[in-house]
Amino acid sequence: MDESLVNWLASVSKDPFAYVLGAWEWGSPGRLANFKGPNYWQEDQLKGIRDRLQSTTNLTEALQPVLEATASGHGVGKSAEVSWLCKWGIDTLPDTRGVVTANTEPQLKGKTWAELGRWHASSITKDVFKLTATSYYHPEYERTWRLDQVPWSKNNPEAFAGLHNQGRRILLIMDEASAIDDIIWETSEGALTDKDTQIFWLVYGNPTRNSGRFKECFPGGMFAKYWHTRSVDSRSIDFTNKEQISKWIDAYGEDSDFVRIRVYGQFPRVGEMEFFNAAEITDAMSRDATSSLTDPLALGVDVARYGKNASVIFPRKGRDARTYPRERFQGLSTVQLAEKVFDANFRLHADGIMVDGGGVGGGVVDQIRHKALFCYEVQFGSKDMTPHRSFGSEQERYANMRSGMYGALRAWTKSGCLPDDPDLKRQFMAIKYTFNKRDEIQLISKEDMLKLDPDLELDDIDALALTFSNALAPHEYAGGDHPHKPNVEHDYDPFERYEDEVRAA
């Protein structure tokens, strides 16, 4: 390193705020053109850490673990703050060791670590430290001066048990910490036992759960006295999308759990909860497929309206959603998709075709009807008209048609049969719900879920849910890939007389 850079890094070793101001060219053309530095809450945290390190001359007191928990709404700059502190922690003190984890491996690799990569590439130490797919380190001291990303697993908490660095600095950062299992928190506490060591345990996340270790860090919680906490409201940040925030408040209600979590940065009253039970989904994917010949066969058709998403045709015959495989298509026009639906109907003799009619789906509905096929047009956002009595979900109140169909699907999974497919299970477990201001069950909308997690795919489960939009009556010649009564029957047989003459001869 250049000597002047070495001296500067040493001078900000106890001042992360000064490091952040000096490590990037704020206001320069590009992503920092409209920024003069950290926003108010980021500055507050950076200065708070600085003050903890500089406020006392007593070594033991100065080196008490720094525990910081930040709950926030969406889009307030958590990932940037994580990146700055990762770089400050490693860049400014030799032989620092650290670990970064997140709620899921895709979040850790695709967002947290990717954001670190963007900030590293534009920093003044980009040519000094090396960033790989899993580590950030000084090339000459790779074993002792490094930060690693570590996906967590409650079946292997020991990965977090060996974070010790006696007499130096330890950095432990958890992103989207509300969803990290308690056992990982408990194991990580072992790093707090090193004496005369700078220890920074920094946790961030949307406060999605009203229980667990993240919640217990905040006032009223079991561990609150050990943690310095803050809540950040998305509305207080200059660069958040105020129009989107306004839509969320209008759609879910100003005191709904969704708005409390995603906008206010406050913990929910009940929680943004998983809609499906994991054990029930596992059972549905493992039980034998059974159906009766009289069970009607429904085709659910979800129409793709996003670039990478797929259009899906999902057959379900009674309690069986496995025997007849779903079909996925990408890049099809409405005419082409209607042809695929026509072919599936011809093969399976469907008793009902249920099509998502929102957006471009209306074109598919028109094309199917143009082929003289009847289909149900389903609007996900319309009033709930799901035949709940037919599916055993009549005891609950739903905010809209989508929520109602999913409610019927949830009741069906208790005895239904699903394909044994990990991707489909991930889709089931991604569905979250809250209660609106009328205390009706309201799923987090597909559009909002994709805004919060662009990598999420929900096409298959939406197509399956569509098969519950209308009730179909059982009958003797119900759909399926088996012999059926001819579509047209004639009493007159033109060959009957000829056959009689042959027999007589």
Image: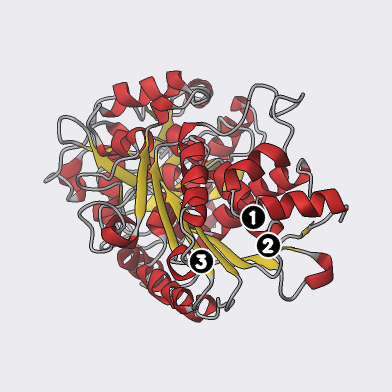
Q: Is residue 487 left or right of residue 98?
A: left
SS of the residue under disc 1: loop
Q: Is residue 456 left or right of residue 148?
A: left
SS of the residue under disc 2: loop
Separation of marks 1 and 2 at Cα, in angstroms: 6 Å
Which numbered disc flags the more N-terminal residue, 3 or 2? 2
Which numbered disc flags the more N-terminal residue, 1 or 2? 1
Which quadrant holds the N terminus? bottom right
Location of residue 267 in the rendering, given as x and y in whole percent from the top left corner? 28, 45
Foreground residue among 294 and 14:
14
Which numbered disc flags the more N-terminal residue, 1 or 3? 1
Q: Residue furthest right?
A: 2
Foreground residue among 435 and 84:
84
Q: Residue furthest left?
A: 395
Separation of marks 1 and 3 at Cα, in angstroms: 13 Å
The residue carrying mark 1 is: 13
- Mark 1 vs 2: CB contact within 8 A: yes
The residue carrying mark 3 is: 199
The residue carrying mark 2 is: 93
65 vs 24: above or below:
below
Location of residue 376 in the rendering, given as x and y in whole percent from the top left corner? 37, 29
Look at label 3 and name its amino acid: Ile
